[in-house]
Image (spheres, grey):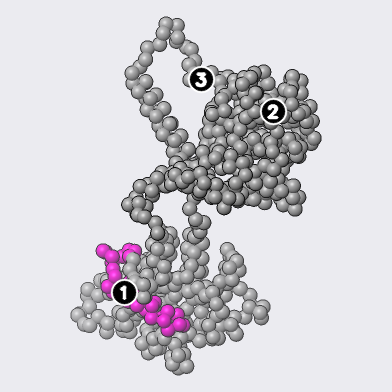
Amino acid sequence: MNAIVALCHFCELHGPRTLFCTEVLHAPLPQGAGSRDGAGRGEPADEDEGGIQMSSRIRAHSPAEGASAESSSPGPKKSDMCEGCRSLAAGHPGYISHDKETSIKYVSHQHPNHPQLFSIVRQACVRSLSCEVCPGREGPIFFGDEQHGFVFSHTFFIKDSLARGFQRWYSIIAIMMDRIYLINSWPFLLGKIRGIIDELQGKALKVFEAEQFGCPQRAQRMNTAFTPFLHQRNGNAARSLTSLTNDDSLWACLHTSFAWLLKACGSRLTEKLLEGAPTEDTLVQMEQLAELEEESESWDNSEAEEEEKGPALPEGAEGRELTKCPAESSLLSDCGAWQPRKLSVFKSLRHMRQVLGAPSFRTLAWHVLMGNQVIWKSRDSDLVHSAFEVLRTMLPVGCVRVVPYSSQYEEAYRCNFLGLSPHVQIPPHVLASGTSLVGPRDSERDHVAGCQLRVRTTPAGLRDSRAHVLTPSAPPSVGPTILNKMEAALTNQNLSVDVVDQCLVCLKEEWMNKVKVLFKFTKVDSRPKEDTQKLLSILGASEEDNVKLLKFWMTGLSKTYKSHLMSTVRSPMALEPRN
């Protein structure tokens, strides 16, 4: 996270002062840091935890020490600082942590070395301890602007037996330029900074109670004659935070806490790039989910009403188990309601093509893409589920209507994928229509007249079975363009199964875009047939099979897209004449 976390203190002699700050460095260290980093000289690290390696090596001089540092550093001069305004001792190089995962460095010292950063931190320090104060003077607050950055500030008090009111005023601030990110990080920062404050206050309270027990200051002050307060304490007007907490490793611990805070706060929120508008499949799935929720709510309401009415049961009905539908009834559901089982009979389209053979698979794929009803008869319901799970990937979600396994025939307008048990008789008009395809079934059943193909690579679920393909009129040898491209991807052994799946997704999106153009051209704009033929030629879909495919896939368009087009046409802007 590109931010600065700092600990500030309100000194009774010098006003608001920055005690300790930690910043993130993505670039090389400031001048003098790289030469004294010591990483290549084998110096041991003080701490290595969670991917952050800490050491006490930054610079040879602190910006608040020495005459040479005073001339170039934006920090206050040594004469303007007291013991309470200083954090690191004279000659202390500061702290640096190396994040081995991201190659980011977390640097801690009393003041930022860059003049602009020093000005931003200085202004935030003054505002957090003077004008931007929450009710009660202790707690979190947010302020800032685009020019000087946005600040999360949490003010608090530390017990001091020698201070006015027996307490000193501090604040921990987090500064960054991204307002939205800082606001979204408010709960995280509040909890972690509150933990750091509680630890500091707990240590200071122990020291305060020990000092009060040994020499109570309240009674001593009350018994002393009135004199100016600052002169009464004999030069003890300011005490360092290390003495208030009796912790010599306080600044190293604060550096570790601030560095972890910056790393954790930066990794908890991630940005996601939305690649354009949702696809048609996504819209259809959302609509189907909404319909299922409405249907479930209506069922719940109707059941509640029936329970309130308390319907009387006929005599002798006590103890019976009432069911809404018989166990042997067909399970009619769309692709949104049908959750395919996790089966592995057919692993992919490529595997199905190897099992059925190239000619049978091409015939099967042609009927699927054209919207003809595919009937799969088998005793093994798992085999049928697995086959439909693979075949449905060739179609848009809105074009898939599945009855996974039924004991009776379902009409083509209700489903285009139908699984049947072997004893179910198919109506003669369906067999004679040529619009349905009867898929593999068991070898011991009487086979339908047609092309008989023995299964080649027989998996466990297809052992001792034959594939019977019924098609009075064989599909054209040319076929739709998407079928030819799909077969080219399946036969290319250099492409993995995952790559083939992505190719199929791209092909479906390409042809769904053509479907959208054709729908608007014909159904919304009502263009004549001559213009439609020209459009199909431009789209590269003038062949008969491509036209049939586009018309069938048009039924899979989402209601959201259709209503959006109709509302656009009816808008006043759309009624204006085109030049």
For badge 3, the amino acid type reads Cys
Residue 508 falls within the magenta-colored stretch: no
Q: Residue 260's spot in the image, x, y percent?
A: 51, 66
Residue plotted at (56% across, 30% down)? 415
For badge 1, the amino acid type reads Arg
Q: Which residues are magenta?
A: 112-141
Crowd tier of the residue under label 1, counting other residues whose Cα lies within 10 Å: few below 14, some 14–19, many 20 or above? some
Q: Residue 203's spot in the image, x, y percent?
A: 42, 66
Q: Which residue is mark 1?
A: 127
Q: Residue furthest top?
A: 315
Q: Nearer the viewer, mark 2 or mark 3?
A: 2
Crowd tier of the residue under label 2, counting other residues whose Cα lies within 10 Å: few below 14, some 14–19, many 20 or above? some
Where disc 2 sits, the SS reads loop
Residue 131 falls within the magenta-colored stretch: yes
Residue plotted at (27% across, 82% down)? 230
Q: Are marks 1 and 3 in contact (CB under 8 Å)?
A: no
Q: Which badge, 2 or 3, is on the more N-terminal residue?
A: 3
Q: Which residue is mark 3?
A: 325
Q: As displayed, is residue 533 above or below residue 182?
A: above
Where disc 3 sits, the SS reads loop
